[in-house]
Structures are given as C-alpha cells and as structure tokens.
Image: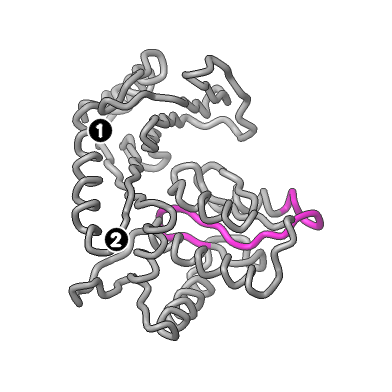
Amino acid sequence: IAVKDNHGEFVLLNGNQTAAVLLYYIFRKWKENGKITGKEFMVKTIVTSELLIDLANKYDIETYDVLTGFKWIADIIRKNEGIKTFIAGGEESYGYMIGDFVRDKDAVSSCAMIAETAAWAASQGKTIYDILIDIYMEFGFYLEGLIAVVKKGMSGAEEIAGIMKRFRENPPSMINNSRVVMIKDYEFSVAKDMIAGTEEHIDLPKSNVLQFFLEDGSKISIRPSGTEPKIKFYFGVKGELNDIASFEKVRDELEDKMKQITADLDL
C-alpha cells in the first residue's frame, strides 16, 4: 500500500510494515473489546519480521512460526481447532489472513482491514504512516531487506548447493561485529544456542533454510528458491527510535547496517 510520509510524499510500505500495522490495530481492538482470553494465537512465517512477535507478546497472544506458504498457517489453525482462537497471520511478501474463514492468502479481507485501520487512524488525527512510527517508537525500529542471487543452469544449482553447504558446515561466529547467538537449521530440525552450547528440536517439516540470530537483534535467513534459480538472503535489523525527528537518521543507520552485513557475508 502507498501512504503519505511526514513530508507529504507517497511511500510504499513493505510486507512486514503492512503486517505490523494490521496486527497492531487488530490486537488493540481485540483487547479493547475484551476478546483476549489467553487462548488466542497468530501465525507468521519464519522469514517474516520478529516485530510481529513483540506485538503479540504485548497482548499475551501466542505466536507460531511456520515455513513459507499459507498451507502451513492453515495447518496450525487446523491443529488448534476447538482449542485456541486464530486471530490473524501472514508473511513478508504481502500475504495476510484475517480470521480463519478463508484459510489462505486473502487480499479481499486484508484490504478491507487496511481501510478500517486507516479510518481508525484518521479518527485520531493520524495516518497509517503515523501508526507505523508509533509502533517503531514503542517496540523498536525493525527494518527488513531481501537479496536474491541468481545462479542459472546446472552449474548454478551446484553453486547454490555449495553456498548452503558452506554456511551450514562453517557457520560464522560473528557477523558485522555482532556475535551469532542462535543458529536454526530447518534441514536438520535443530536450533543451536551458540552461547549456552545447547540444542533444541525444531518441530517443523524439514526445509533447506538456515537462520542466524545476532546479539544485536539482527536476523539473517538463507534459503534456495523453490521455483527459480535463486538463493535468497533475508535480512532483519533493529534499532531504537526515541522521537519522530530521528526517524530518517535511524532508518539510514539501519540501511547501512544491512549493507555492512551483506558485505560481511561476501554477497
């Protein structure tokens, strides 16, 4: 969606930002209407912003992380049917599910809810952009990015496999001067705590995905595309936003951090 920023210029919100605004509004309304009982949950994909977890935690809403694809979100809904209540969920690529009626990516209900959110913001003399800034000031400034590296042909497929093997067998201990504190390998269903030296089982179907969580709150996810000759690198970084006037400065700093991480990974 396109919204006007503080300079009156239209900017496009990315999928993570749109999800954050939607869930912020929905969770608030559920709370105001007394519908939060402790049995509610939301679902996001593993490459979607960690900001959504912070939003859910504020309202004591449980979060499930799933693999990419709405069939996995629907699967969690089915498993909790009659036990817990699904509120909403989605993924970073502009896909959202509001309620459990459709059980697939649903643009119709999502657009209607965005319009309702905009009307709610306007009733307070704000815009959707203002709401996004409010979220960043309360929960932290999360910024995400994606790099897709194209490797065509059989040799490209071998290169992609080699990249995954390199990161899997020789994982970095530091990225951009920040310690790697957790590595999740969905191919082997294991989450390794690099500080405590412990491991936990990941209860998800196996998938060729690696994730690195850094001490400074950054997250890097790596996975080959399932449909194209690409390997995708998802980046998530976090900073503090103390006032509206600092927005552009903090945003630029976070963009620089993503560039530094990219350079550190030799992409």
For the record, the magenta segment spans 78-96
**In the picture shown, does residue 225 fall above or below 246?**
above
Q: Residue 113: percent from the left, percent from the top?
A: 51, 75
The answer to whether 128 appears left or right of 104 in the picture is left
Residue drawn at the location 27% of the way across and 41% of the way down: 147
> What is the three-letter code of the residue carrying label 2?
Asp
**In the picture shown, does residue 7 fall above or below 73?**
below
Q: Residue 129: percent from the left, percent from the top?
A: 33, 70
Instruction: Say whether disc 2 or disc 1 marks the residue closer to the N-terminus.
Output: 2
Residue drawn at the location 50% of the way across and 62% of the way down: 96
Is there CB contact under 8 Å for labels 2 and 1?
no
Decide which of 106, 41 is in the foreground and name it: 41
Residue drawn at the location 53% of the way across and 50% of the way down: 44
The answer to whether 187 appears left or right of 37 in the picture is left
Decide which of 31, 63 is in the foreground and name it: 31
Q: Which residue is mark 1?
A: 261
> What is the three-letter code of the residue carrying label 1?
Ile
Q: Is 65 a magenta residue?
A: no
The mark closer to the camera, 2 or 1, is 2
Q: Residue 152: percent from the left, percent from the top?
A: 25, 33
Which quadrant of the rendered structure holds the N terminus?
A: bottom left
Q: Is 95 a magenta residue?
A: yes
Q: Which residue is mark 2?
A: 243
Which quadrant of the rendered structure holds the C terminus?
A: top left
**Which mark identifies residue 140?**
none
